Amino acid sequence: MLDFNGQVVLITGAGSPKGIGRTIAHTFARQGAQVVITDINQVGLDANVKEMEANGWKAYGIAGNICDKDSVDTLVKTVDEGLAAYNVTESARAIAAFVDELSNWYVRRSRERFWGKGMQGGKLAAFETLYTVLKTLCGLLAPFTPFMAETMYQNLRQEGEPDSVHLTDFPACDATKINPALEADMETVIEIVQLGRGCRSEANLKVRQPLAAAYVKGAQLSAEMAALIAEELNVKDVRFVDDARAFTTYQLKPQMRTLGPKYGKRLRAIGEHLANMDGNDVVDAFARGETVSFEIEGETIVLEKDDVLTAPAHKPGFVAATERELTVVLDTNLTPALVEEGFVREVISKIQTMRKDADFDVTDRIAVIVEAGETLTGILEANQEALSAAVLASSVAFGPAGESATEWNINGEKARIRVEVAPGKN
């Protein structure tokens, strides 16, 4: 029997009571290792840790993040099968798409976990996941970009591993780690977020301005996925609906080509009548194969589907975007509470920018002085605790900020802000 003599072994996906991750964890623990297990299933994770401790083994649990369930094994399978079939272009495109998602989704969403002190909790899980993915990418990239892959590998290589990425085995797919349903759900989440950002852009609303709700038609996702969407779009609630009629409609116009010969002199009146009709009702009638009729000055007007030009539109207070079967609607009605929170988030963003420009360490505690008008000062005073927590401020004072302060325009309100490292707080 092998003796790991207290060595630390990190195992991901060990939250299932009957999963292979649990079996591997028990095997290492039985042989003397200190086992650190991670999983997004907090309940299962706790149960397995307790079971291992009851056996007298050393075990520690770290709750992972839904984003840690990467799709790298799916990528390995795609690239391996593609190269075997000489589909080099498709394999390269798969890698490029994966890297884009890794950079713009996983790494961006995990920034706060990377910034924490030490290597505790979710930070360890985030780094372990990223390290594993990058190491696998080195092997996948080696046939395509040998020198870049070698540089990456040397930065990641540990003692005892082959001297070059080109001396390692090509990555192998572990089919037990592939979760098609989870990957599909995450792709849907990303699509929803992209559509939601498009809605914000159309409504000229910054992402930092909180909104009441987002409505999604064409998908049904778990509460955990909904939480991701809410955080990305900065909305208080995400609701999955079967019908978006309450938020969207259609703009209706007469089709001159077909209606001209039939109702030439009535075209203007027909256009005015269509503009006042419920677009959803008209489109639904056409979808059922029916016609739409109404009277103008005693004459019955009968319209078929080809007689009406339709274009998606949104009702006042809502902005919608549609892609294939997916529709995302944002409630753009701003309450005083939402506007106030928007001011606070904007100030937080400016202070974070100042921290970065001043080259402060991400864990430095700071002192903040804000010089602003009555409206902005009142909002910040009422939300001082949230502001302090977000920017790691030991103190937030209001008054003259001095000559070294930076001037900002906060949603139309002028402000001067000064930040400095808080003495004795780091």
Image (cartoon, rainbow, N blue to C red):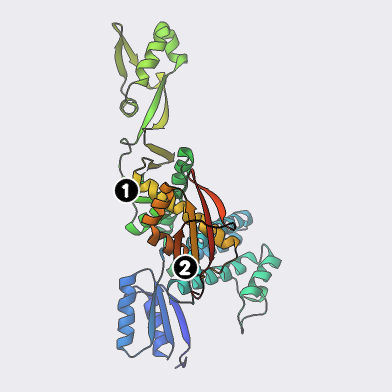
**Can residue 67 be seen at all in this image of the molecule?**
no
Q: Position of residue 290 (x, y in %)?
A: 30, 23
When asked about the image quadrant of residue 133, the answer is: bottom right
Identify whether 77 is placed above or below 292: below
Q: Depth check: 263 or 124 in front?
A: 124
- Crowdedness of circle 2 by 10 Å Cα count: few (<14), some, many (20+)? some
Q: Earlier in the sequence, mark 1 or mark 2?
A: 2
Q: Depth check: 354 or 184 in front?
A: 354
| Marks 1/2: CA–CA distance | 27 Å
- Residue at image position (35%, 51%) is 236
Dot 2: what SS? helix
Q: Depth check: 369 or 28 in front?
A: 369
Marker disc for residue 239: 1
| Label 1 with label 2: CB-CB less than 8 Å | no
**Can residue 331 be seen at all in this image of the molecule?**
yes
- Crowdedness of circle 1 by 10 Å Cα count: few (<14), some, many (20+)? some
Q: Depth check: 332 or 397 in front?
A: 397
Identify the amino acid type marked 2: Arg
Identify whether 105 is placed above or below 166: above
Identify the amino acid type marked 1: Arg
Left of 119 or right of it: where is 44? left
Q: Position of residue 117 (x, y in %)?
A: 49, 74
Dot 1: what SS? strand
Marker disc for residue 113: 2
Marker disc for residue 349: none
Q: Position of residue 385 (x, y in %)?
A: 38, 62
- Residue at image position (41%, 66%) is 65
Left of 13 or right of it: where is 73? right
The nearer-to-camera label among 1 and 2 is 2
The quadrant the N terminus occupies is: bottom left
Q: Position of residue 166 (x, y in %)?
A: 67, 73
Identify whether 163 is placed above or below 407: below
